Image (spheres, rainbow, N blue to C red):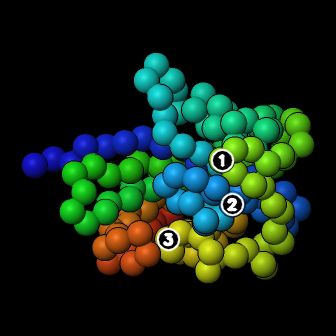
Amino acid sequence: MAQKKKIFTLCIVHQEGKVLLGMKKRGFGKDRWNGFGGKVQEQESIEEAMFRELKEEAGITPLSFEKRALLEFHFQGKPEYLEVHVFHTSSFAGEPAETEEMKPQWFSQKDIPFEDMWPDDKHWFPLFLQGKKFKGVFLFQDKNIIRDHTLKEVDSL
């Protein structure tokens, strides 16, 4: 039986050796630091979803952006998988502000709190921070254990 795909966005704000992450306050990924994003809604492009989620979760709007990655997340025993389009922005309008869903905080690149993030982040974040484009597939046993993963750099997405 083919797995059903759910499409998500993730935007990482990265500038001058710092990364803006948000502490998720509710829902999927609660109590973890993450980039900003969520499910792409019907009649919405992936880019429109990224803009909407960044505004809803951090109160900012990207002025420019680049798609850096396409990641698949499979969870053992689940009938669907997540296809996540990962974007980078370094310029934005507005000031990052706490919302009902996220509490933004800047981290220096050397102090990224991987121990309080999704376990896959430590695998792909270094490629992201180096400005590489890449694709990856992660198979989770549960929300904390990765059974298997692949990552490969690509020329375009």
Q: Compare residues 69 and 142 and report the one nearer the observer.
A: 142
The amino acid type found where label 1 is placed reads Glu
Residues under labels 3 and 2: Cα distance? Answer: 16 Å
The secondary element bearing badge 1 is classed as loop
Q: To which residue does mark 3 refer?
A: 120
- Badge 3 crowding class, 10 Å Cα cut-off, few under 14, some 14 to 19, many 20 or more, is some
Q: To which residue does mark 2 refer?
A: 23
- From the viewer's perspective, tell me whether residue 41 is left or right of residue 88: left
Q: Residue at x 46, y 19 (%)?
A: 43
Q: Compare residues 15 and 39 and report the one nearer the observer.
A: 39
Circle 1/circle 2 CB separation < 8 Å: no
Q: Residue at x 35, y 71 (%)?
A: 142
Q: Residue at x 73, y 35 (%)?
A: 55
Q: To which residue does mark 1 refer?
A: 101
Q: Kindly give the residue lying farthest to the left in the view shown.
A: 1
Q: Is residue 14 above or below residue 89?
A: below
Tell how many labels: 3
